[in-house]
Image: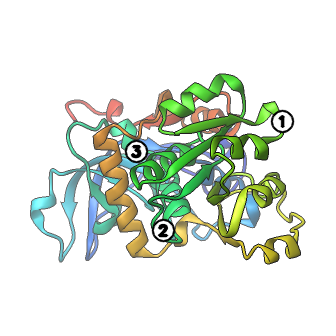
Amino acid sequence: MRAAWYDRQGPAHEVLQIGELPDPQPGEGEVRVRVSVSGIHVGDLGKRQGWWGSTMAFPRIVPHGDGAGVIDAVGAGVDPSRIGERVWVYLAQAYRPSGTAAELTVVPSRHAVTLPAEVPYEQAAGLGIPGITGHRAIFADGPVAGQRVVVTGALGAVGRAALAVARRGGATVIATVRSPEQVEQALAAGAHHAVDTAGGDVAARILERTGGELVDRVAELAFDANLTTNLEILRYGGVIATYATGATEPSIPYWPLSFKNITVRFLSNDDFPEPANEVAAADLTAALVAGDLRYPIAARLPLEKIADAHELVEHSSARGRVVLDLAGNRTGQP
């Protein structure tokens, strides 16, 4: 099979290689997917670069945790009728050496989620890491029906998923975005209200949108930068569910958080409980089918341009998702 890989960590153009690797075979409880589109997330870049202290658990890594395609083989214990099924996959490269930056990838059967024909591969290909993270940020502490939920960085990959599932879950959703020009985009993506952080006094403007009512939960992109705002807007017993931070060792205002009995939930996608992953996968697929979740696709590059694709994601020079087109390497494939 045609694939991309790296044998050492480092910059994309220095370490990523492209060539032929042996076709993987599915083991017990696994399926093999012929990948049509491979998604790229900042977590994939982090593993390659060695960010956050990450190291290589395997001597060779085929990157990318997310993708979409068609099951073409199954292992023992998996219903053979799954062969030919359109799916999106997640955690393909979590605790495993080989992800979706290849024509073929093998994952546990439960990590290959049925994808209805009306959903384009490119929409589902990047859904796993950001989508399941966004879902977990909203629902890890229970249902949100009737609650007020703030989603920061609402137009990012995680933010869009969080917006969609929070609204579908019955919450009143307030989005934060960087600029006034993005407010309408956030409303179109599912927010009931949107506040741009460039306008200053973000806490006061969020509370204006809620009629002065304090917020129940925050799905947080910037834990360090937004702590002060979150202390102002959260109710007693509220939740900050955070999946990223600027400063790796931020100063935490212990007593203000304690006095308000605020829960801070730290999220890392590779290690969510399996039942939570499965609920998230079902909810996210339903959001895609309903049209409540849509990702703008900024670039669709061939496998041979994987280093360029990584740099687009790394430097945020593109607006929207960047994906790899594996089907373009083949003739006559779906």
Which of the image's four quarters has the C terminus?
top left
In this picture, residue 312 sits left or right of residue 31: right
Looking at the picture, how far across and down is residue 101, in whole percent? 46, 47
Using the image, tell me which numbered label, if any, was put on residue 200. 1
Q: Is residue 325 above or below residue 225?
A: above
Q: Are marks 1 and 3 in contact (CB under 8 Å)?
A: no
Residues 242 and 249: in front is 242
* Identity of the residue drawn at 69% across and 64% down: 235
Marks 3 and 2: which is nearer the front? 3
Q: Amino acid at mark 2?
A: Arg
Q: What secondary structure is marked by label 1?
A: loop
**Of marks 1 and 2, which one's residue comes earlier in the chain?**
2
Looking at the picture, how far across and down is residue 269, in whole percent? 55, 64
Q: Quadrant of residue 89?
A: bottom left
Q: Quadrant of residue 288?
A: top left
Q: Amino acid at mark 1?
A: Gly
> Of all residues shown, which one is farthest toward the top?
181
Q: What secondary structure is marked by label 2?
A: loop
Using the image, tell me which numbered label, if any, was put on residue 125. 3
Q: Amino acid at mark 3?
A: Ala
Looking at the picture, how far across and down is residue 276, in whole percent? 42, 70
